Amino acid sequence: MREPTAILKDLVKQVHDPAIPKHERYGITSVCSAHPIVLEAALRRAASNRTPVLIEATCNQVNQEGGYTGMTPADFRSLVASIAVKVGCPMEAIILGGDHLGPNPWKHLPAEEAMARAGDMVASYAAAGFRKLHLDTSMGCAGEPAVLADAVVAERAAILAARAEAVAPGMPVYVVGTEVPVPGGALETLDHLIPTTGQAACSTAAMTRKIFSRTLSDEVWSRVIALVVQPGVEFSAEETVFYQPAKACGLVATLASFPGMVFEAHSTDYQTVSHLRALVEDGFSILKVGPALTFALREALFSLDELALVLRPGRLSLMQVLENEMQAAPSFWKGHYDPEKADMLRLYGYSDRIRYYWSRPGIQRAVSDLLDVLKSTGLPDPLVSQFLPRFYERVRSGEIPREGMAILLAAVEDVLDDYGSACTPGRAQ
């Protein structure tokens, strides 16, 4: 397996190779999750297929202060490494990245303080061996406008890159940009979603290059491999906006102006395989997915929970444990949903705010208890058919072991398989 940054640089080269037609372009999936089952599914799949796997932790999940998972970047790397050993995935196949690295977790503070903490975070990611760093300084801090000028965003990104270079000189590759979709899906309706214009993309790239070259070096700029733009894809609690190539054609046409870069597409969750494939063919070579993976995991857990309630009536359900925990600590979902629909969306919304709660001890115990119940009861065919019809034939044939954990892993792997098909020429249907 090639060195991680070389794999990503090759990804860029093939997009700009005139001998490679669009329909032969390949991409890579960025797995943006800290959930151990999601990570295991991604690493199992990479080990089985003998392919590289890109795994990214976000600034809110993992940072030098612990994030909402309680993990530092070094902790996260250790978690990934332990799972990799378990499933037989070589570490050299794993590319670790940091997503939305910037002041977002501290944007309620004055800019100087928020940026100081963001710098410490970037340094901790670089020191822990994360090689793909998405520098996101697009948000305003306390007392600043919500949207900052390109020059300010670029200056702050360069400050963070300098912190990474001080710790791991010459090692990281970077992703930059100013039109960055909100992590975890939009909060508002999606009626007026507009792709980034070609002019805006060119302006952002030119400004960022100018500042990186001036304050860092041309060599550091040569390791900026991707620009985050809005291709016209997004999801909210109830909606998905699918990629429409015709609306992004002006943006796509500008990619030839950035010979060392590709586009990185955020919020690609819940796109169809054909829409994902169209993104890859148009040069959006890095497809980020996060909530869709834990959404699939949650669906499978709830189905197993309902199955277990038939076999063990009266047991406290996982769904009730989650509801109790989310009501007791509402900060991760309150304000993100229409109050009139919150009772439904809290558990079932596309934005999957449940993902902030899986690491809580009470919920971890409830999941463990559910899987223990299923080990003792088994998974009878009629109930698998009723509650898990998508997996029924594969369980009956033995393709998926008749175990709760095997079904959870399969649910996540199914989503990753869709992304794998989209990123591989000739695979998407």
Image (cartoon, helix red, strand yellow):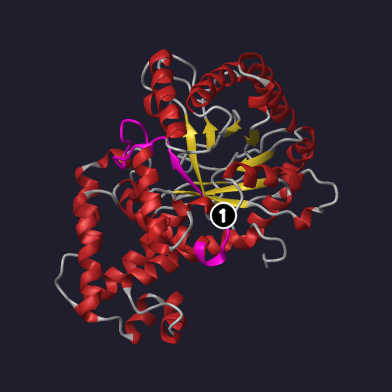
In this picture, is 46 found above or below 310?
above
Mark 1 lies on residue:
52
Amino acid type at mark 1: Pro
Residue occupying image coordinates x 38% and y 40%: 336
Question: Which span is picked out in magenta?
Answer: 47-73
Q: Where on the picture, by quarter, is residue 392?
A: bottom left
Look at the image and tell me in which quarter the C terminus lies.
bottom right
In this picture, is 190 found above or below 399?
above
Which residue reaches farthest right? 19
Residue occupying image coordinates x 22% and y 80%: 377
Q: Where on the picture, by quarter, is residue 171?
A: top right
Is 233 displayed left or right of 299 in the figure? right
Q: Where on the picture, by quarter, is residue 57?
A: top left
In this picture, is 418 found above or below 400?
above
Residue 366: x percent and y percent?
A: 21, 60
Query: Does the rendering let one see residue 341?
Result: no
Residue in front for this viewpoint, 421 or 41: 41
Residue 306: x percent and y percent?
A: 28, 71
Magenta stretch contains residue 244: no
Residue in front for this viewpoint, 171 or 287: 171
